[in-house]
């Protein structure tokens, strides 16, 4: 496992949970690409760090408080990190709890590609990993 890449991903998750969008921005490569899960209302892809951050800010505005909590161990290879998470949102209207898996590609110490999957096995397969 590439602990350095896991640390980059953890820093991004910690920044999200702290509401520190500037710190989150710093975890992403300027040429970052994000793909939403199948069936997501804004399918993307979102190309470039600024587009990724706009999408994150839009998601963040949906609730007055939200967190992302890893619920599996981090699976990692040379440049890929995959983790299943639960996203808790509260505030405007009903509370939300969504489970999905995030597959990250880390390049030169920053997140270059981020892809969301509803199915954990699909994410692992896409990243060339196994449990």
Image: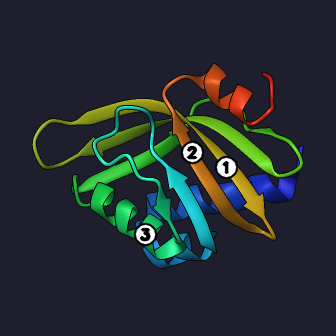
Q: CA distance from mark 2 to mark 3?
A: 14 Å
Label 2, secondary structure: give it: strand
Q: CA distance from mark 1 to mark 2?
A: 6 Å
Q: Nearer the viewer, residue 82 or 41?
A: 41
Q: Quadrant of the C terminus?
A: top right
Q: Nearer the viewer, residue 129 or 92?
A: 129
Q: Residue at x 58, y 31 (%)?
A: 71
Residue 29 percent across, percent down from the top left? 65, 72
Q: Nearer the viewer, residue 43 or 84?
A: 43
Left or right: where 7 falls relative to 66: right
Left or right: where 60 falls relative to 105: left
Q: Residue at x 42, y 32 (%)?
A: 38
Residue 126 percent across, percent down from the top left? 70, 32
Q: Which residue is mark 2?
A: 115
Q: CA distance from mark 3 to mark 1?
A: 17 Å
Label 3, secondary structure: give it: helix
Residue 62 percent across, percent down from the top left? 22, 53
Q: Would you call the spot at circle 2 few (<14 residues within 10 Å), some (14-19), or many (20 or more)? A: some
Q: Are marks 1 and 2 in contact (CB under 8 Å)?
A: no
Sequence-wise first label, 2 or 3 = 3
Label 1, secondary structure: give it: strand
């Amino acid at each position: 496992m590439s602990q350095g890449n896991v640390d980059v991903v953890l820093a991004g998750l910690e920044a999200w949970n702290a509401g520190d969008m500037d710190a989150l921005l710093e975890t992403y490569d300027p040429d970052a690409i994000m793909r939403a899960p199948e069936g997501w209302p804004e399918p993307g892809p979102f190309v470039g760090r600024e587009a990724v951050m706009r999408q994150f800010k839009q998601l963040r505005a949906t609730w007055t408080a939200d967190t992302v909590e890893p619920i599996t161990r981090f699976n990692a290879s040379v440049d890929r990190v995959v983790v299943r998470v639960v996203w808790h949102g509260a505030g405007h209207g009903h509370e939300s709890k969504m489970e999905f898996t995030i597959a990250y590609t880390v390049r030169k110490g920053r997140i270059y590609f981020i892809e969301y999957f509803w199915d954990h096995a699909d994410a692992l397969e896409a990243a060339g990993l196994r449990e």
